[in-house]
Amino acid sequence: PMVAIISMDGLLVFSGSLILMDVLASKGATASQTMRKILRNPPLIGISLGLVVGLLGITLPTGFSLFADFLGDTASPVLLFALGIILSQSAAVSRPMLPVAIAGMKLVVHPLLALVVLGSVLQLSPELRNPGVMVAAAPCGVMAFMLAMNYAVRVDAISRAILYSSIGSLVTVTIAAGL
């Protein structure tokens, strides 16, 4: 269930968010210019190619797979390094409670909502419900930081929310694991 959750999140939520951000960032552009921007978005190209390769059952050459694995393994450490640089250089956040609110929503509201929806509304068994609650109890993802940098959005609040939620998730993931 955990792999399915992460895969569907990447495919639907992440792709949809990228498309929405490209549309919103293209104010004043024609529909064809916006579509061209969406079709040239590197993460969307990667997701699309991965989906096609997976659905068609294509086996990639070993060298390419090894390179892709190495490249993928470096993404999170590089983003965390960039996050550390931003945190070390940033002054006070203009709205200091915003990162606290984001982290609180992610660590408290999100897991409780997942527990209610998966447990009470969908009435899933604990074997299917608990992985979803654990994913919801995890910290804010570094992907939001990457997207903010990519779309030239201020990263001070996002970087602090990631830091706060990473610390707080030590408690929330432990509680979720005990369900």
Image (cartoon, helix red, strand yellow):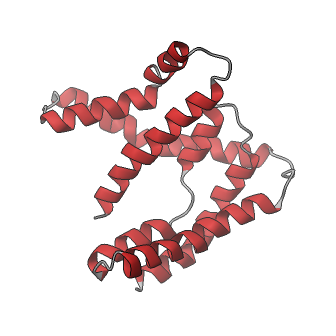
Identify the residue shown where x is 74% and y is 40%: 154
Depth order, front residue of 39/148: 39
* Residue 153 in the figure: left or right of residue 171: right
User: Image quadrant of residue 5?
Assistant: bottom left
Identify the residue shown where x is 57% and y is 58%: 140
Image quarter (top left, top right, bottom left or bottom right) of the N terminus:
bottom left
Q: Say above or below: 174 vs 44.
A: below
Q: Does any portion of residue 67 appear in the rendered image? A: no
* Residue 46 in the figure: left or right of residue 169: left
Query: Residue 76, percent across and down?
Result: 49, 45
Identify the residue shown where x is 30% and y is 77%: 124
User: Image quadrant of residue 166?
Assistant: bottom right
Query: Residue 72, percent across and down?
Result: 38, 39
Image quarter (top left, top right, bottom left or bottom right) of the C terminus:
bottom left
Q: Does any portion of residue 66 appear in the rendered image? A: yes
Depth order, front residue of 102/67: 102
Query: Residue 15, percent across and down?
Result: 44, 39
Query: Residue 52, percent across and down?
Result: 23, 31
Q: Say above or below: 79 vs 68.
A: below
Q: Say above or below: 130 vs 138.
A: below
Depth order, front residue of 176/40: 40
Identify the residue shown where x is 50% and y is 70%: 137
Total marks shown come to 0
Depth order, front residue of 177/133: 133
User: Image quadrant of residue 163?
Assistant: bottom right
